[in-house]
């Protein structure tokens, strides 16, 4: 009897917990890179990059247990940057996403950027190349984040992406669309439009199945319009219209969803990244006369991931090294609960990549990778979830994560040692090198996974000659150089 009473008490405690998890989804012997997740009922599909392989794992939320062993979906080129975009669940129990492979080694070297459509159904997987283009690393960052998948029916999906179009005197952006059925080959592939977008403003292309057209896509980055909207009434013959004069500038599109037949919510940032996400209301989003109405900031410093559900609203995730923060906004643009912490790490563990999604019964599900050794990078995938309207506590962190990259050196000039400081808004691979005036590598100060936050590195060139040196920092799409003057 006492055992039964304890069981009832434990069940009551478990039911009283607002957050379910964290639960372990996978533990890897190698480092885990980019990660995406999607849900269908209580089935969670998680896909991530491990070294040069794409790995898939299915997880049952109700049972809080993996469904079978993880599977290697695809093996890619082991290039410097491999990205997954917009993992989407289909009604036939399959999933699909976009894989981006960047061959460019650094900002001065052009490479071949490859975009592929990846689909999985149980143990069968297909990988179809849909685009490839030579591109500079710096110019490529704006357009290679422009992937969006829209489910048009149970098995039919569209993929929209932005591709570079440039020569030495001019730079523009092409918007492309491909439609896939259950097979590997695209049913349709079209050039939607050629847009005159500033390379430092061109961001993600958001798509939706409009009420009166086959598909509509919206993109920011025009020098003369807040948003450019392209649409088609069939599977071809694209047209574009624009909305100008909106303040503040819409620089980075993050997410969009219909809230009614004539209104929608647009999550965006006024910066060239996902810093300080804000909400707009789009009235008449399916017409050429769409209107923008500002709602305001959602209370997060950065949008790591977001998900829209027509019955609930938008959930936004901010992943920090030590905790995950979530914001939930209903279909009217109002907060459901205050911004709060879904999960906090323990000990020396650090969060790297993360994704968020919403189930049809209102579970806000987060999946993330975590490391217990910052030098080795993340090796574990975890998940946790909370009900849509459940309260979660506010963060207790005293050191906020930087909202942007920064790089400095002091004192400069120096005569014995120099301190090099840099801020990272997101965890990832960092390379910090010292070069001499002739471009020769003198010393590598940092090369590997580094957690988000403020960092300092000291350089003491005891055996180096006096003169000019250069400290070069590379992290994700951020690359910069500082001149150092060494005086013995």
Image (cartoon, rainbow, N blue to C red):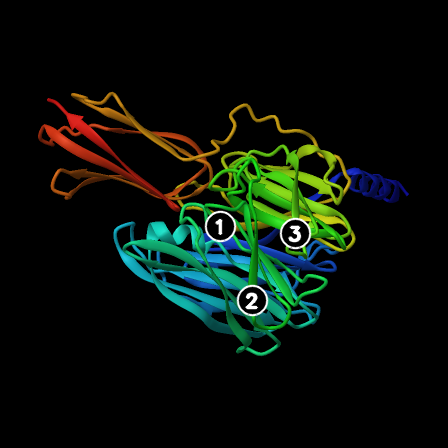
Tell me, for residue 238, which label it has, or none. Answer: 2
Q: Secondary structure at mark 1?
A: loop
Reply above or below: 458 against 249.
above
Taking depth in this image into account, of 19 and 391 the one nearest to the observer is 391
First in residue order: circle 3 vs circle 2: 2
Q: Is residue 108 visible?
A: yes
Residue at the image position 75 percent from the left and 39 percent from the top: 18
Residue that numbered label 1 is attached to: 203
> Residue 405 lies in what quarter of the image?
top left
Reply above or below: 304 against 405.
below
- Alpha carbon separation for disc pair 1 and 2: 20 Å
Q: Secondary structure at mark 3?
A: loop
Look at discs 1 and 2 and give the one toward the viewer: 2
Q: Position of residue 171 (x, y in %)?
A: 36, 54
First in residue order: circle 3 vs circle 1: 1
- Alpha carbon separation for disc pair 3 and 1: 22 Å
């Amino acid at each position: 009897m006492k055992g039964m009473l304890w069981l009832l008490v434990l069940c009551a405690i478990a039911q009283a917990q607002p957050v379910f998890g964290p639960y372990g989804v996978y533990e890897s012997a190698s480092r885990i890179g980019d990660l995406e997740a999607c849900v269908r009922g209580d089935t969670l599909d998680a896909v991530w990059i491990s070294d040069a392989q794409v790995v898939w794992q299915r997880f049952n939320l109700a049972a809080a247990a993996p469904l079978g062993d993880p599977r290697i979906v695809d093996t890619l080129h082991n290039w410097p940057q491999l990205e997954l975009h917009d993992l989407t669940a289909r009604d036939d129990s399959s999933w699909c996403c976009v894989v981006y492979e960047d061959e460019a080694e650094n900002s001065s070297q052009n490479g071949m950027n490859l975009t592929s459509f990846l689909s999985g159904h149980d143990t069968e997987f297909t990988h179809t190349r849909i685009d490839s283009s030579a591109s500079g690393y710096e110019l490529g960052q704006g357009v290679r984040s422009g992937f969006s998948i829209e489910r048009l029916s149970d098995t039919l999906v569209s993929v929209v992406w932005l591709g570079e179009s440039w020569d030495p005197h001019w730079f523009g952006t092409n918007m492309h669309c491909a439609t896939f059925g259950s097979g590997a080959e695209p049913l349709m592939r079209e050039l939607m439009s050629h847009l005159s977008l500033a390379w430092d403003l061109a961001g993600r292309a958001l798509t939706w199945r409009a009420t009166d057209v086959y598909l509509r896509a919206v993109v920011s980055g025009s020098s003369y319009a807040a948003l450019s909207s392209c649409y088609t009434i069939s599977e071809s013959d694209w047209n574009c219209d624009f909305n100008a004069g909106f303040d503040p500038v819409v620089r980075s599109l993050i997410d969009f969803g219909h809230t009614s037949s004539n209104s929608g919510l647009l999550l965006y940032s006024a910066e060239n990244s996902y810093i300080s996400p804000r909400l707009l209301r789009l009235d008449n989003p399916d017409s050429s006369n769409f209107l923008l109405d500002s709602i305001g900031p959602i209370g997060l410093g950065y949008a790591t991931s977001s998900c829209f559900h027509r019955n609930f609203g938008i959930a936004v995730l901010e992943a920090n090294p030590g905790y995950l923060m979530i914001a939930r906004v209903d279909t009217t643009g109002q907060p459901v609960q205050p911004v709060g912490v879904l999960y906090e790490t323990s000990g020396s563990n650090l969060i790297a990549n993360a994704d968020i999604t919403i189930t049809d019964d209102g579970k806000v599900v987060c999946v993330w990778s975590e490391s217990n050794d910052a030098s080795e990078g993340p090796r574990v995938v975890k998940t946790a979830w909370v009900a849509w309207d459940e309260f979660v506590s506010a963060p207790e962190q005293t050191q906020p994560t930087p909202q942007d990259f920064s790089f400095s050196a002091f004192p400069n000039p120096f005569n014995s040692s120099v301190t090099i400081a840099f801020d990272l808004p997101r965890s990832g691979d960092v390379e910090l090198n010292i070069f001499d005036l002739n471009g020769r590598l003198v010393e590598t100060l940092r090369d590997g996974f580094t957690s988000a936050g403020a960092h300092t590195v000291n350089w003491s060139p005891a055996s180096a000659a006096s003169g000019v040196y250069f400290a070069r920092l590379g992290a994700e799409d951020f690359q910069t150089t500082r001149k150092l003057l060494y005086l013995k």
